[in-house]
Image (cartoon, grey):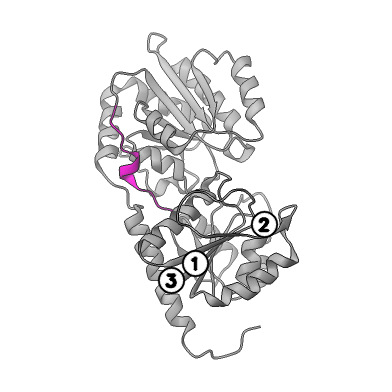
Amino acid sequence: MRIALVSDCYLPRLGGIELQVHDLAVQLIRAGHEVTVFTITDGPAPAGQVPVVRLPAFGGLPLRAAVDRLRSSLPAFDVVHCHSSLVSPLAWQAARLAHRPFLTLHSLPSASTPWPLARIDRYVGDAQWTAVSEAVADVLRNLLPGRAIGVLHNGVDPAMWRQFRRTDHTLTIVSTMRLVRRKRPLATLRILEQIRAAVPSAVQLRAVVIGDGPQTAAAARAVRRRGLDGWVDLPGRLTRFEIQQLYASADVYLAPAELESFGVAALEARCAGLAVVAMASGGVGEFVRPGIEGKLVHSDSEMAATAAALLSDRAKLSRIQSFNRQTDPAMTWKNVLAQHLAAYSTRVAEVRQPPSASRR
């Protein structure tokens, strides 16, 4: 199949959507399909085999030339798969122009924040809405009653994250996130402070919060102000290889975001053998079962107490870590690719049927 993946954000910018769209493209190409990524993210093309069309934009909005390029290019593809966050004008424009595309939502809308999904749905027309998790799909089903909402999960390669385990190390807590308010980096530091207070002082702890973003400076100030600089590190953005090496000598992963649509970083940590402590409100619960892969909690104080209890109970922590290292999650790329290709094939068969009515 010829497949177009459309995403406003893409490499070299780093984030969940960017990496997942790239990894999906790589997996599809390895499976023998012809893939092109369309994006308005500027920058040098990443090394590798993924063709990328970088379209002109201003202020995050695709220019007329970008729309014209989509209009002329997309009809040549068998499948158009658009990847959307809460604001994704390029993906929405492509979905509107393409014939029966997929439109996958990668973000979890807040119940307290109005989001004009019905208006977006009318704009994109006959797009097939999907979500990266059941948590996101449930929101879409509530906001778009009568719409069939599928799930196309994000994927992971467990073997990539199972590095040689270094057992002789200080008990280490990690969290990987973009340092933006939605991911709650400042709350993470408060949670770490509570964990340190709950774990006996004789037990050495180390914490690493990986990532950068608009709240980088505020996080650095908070580390100094709270007296965490003796054991909490903020190394900034790390490569995948560097994160894999860090996880090989880490123990507990914190996922404090309350609106985590899926939790790719948590899934990678789980594959590396870390016990995951995550908020129950997002999509992490699809691959973290309480007491098996980690723990799900409902508040910051519960996260701190749960993580502290795990760090204080080496036997329980070791059981969870061993299970995670030895057991693949359901969201391996083998399974996720099969899931995508099955959906694509069904859509292609539907598109090739004689239309019952002309499209707008």
Q: Which residue is mark 3?
A: 344
Kindly identify the residue that appears in the image at 60 percent across and 35 percent down: 179
Kindly identify the residue that appears in the image at 45 percent across and 29 percent down: 174
Give left or right: position of 213 versus 172.
Answer: right
Q: Quadrant of residue 190?
A: top right
**Magenta stretch: helix, strand or loop mostly:** loop
Residue 237's x, y, as percent?
54, 33
Residue 154 part of the magenta segment: yes
Amino acid on which disc 1 is placed: Ile
Residue 239's x, y, as percent?
47, 36
55, 203: nearer the viewer? 55
Q: Quadrant of residue 95?
A: bottom right
Query: Which of the two marks, 2 or 3, is nearer to us in this view?
Result: 3
Element assignment for label 3? helix
* Any part of residue 158 in sight: yes
Amino acid on which disc 3 is placed: Tyr
Query: Which of the two marks, 3 or 1, is nearer to us in this view?
Result: 3
Looking at the image, which residue sits at the far top?
Answer: 202
Amino acid on which disc 2 is placed: Trp
**Do the residues bearing badges 2 and 3 touch, measured as CB atoms within 8 Å?**
no
**Numbered circle sitting on residue 115:** 2
* Any part of residue 199 in sight: no
Give left or right: position of 335 versus 126.
Answer: left
Quadrant where the image shows the C terminus: bottom right
Quadrant where the image shows the N terminus: bottom left
Q: Earlier in the sequence, mark 1 or mark 2?
A: 2
Whether 50 is drawn above or below 352: the answer is: above
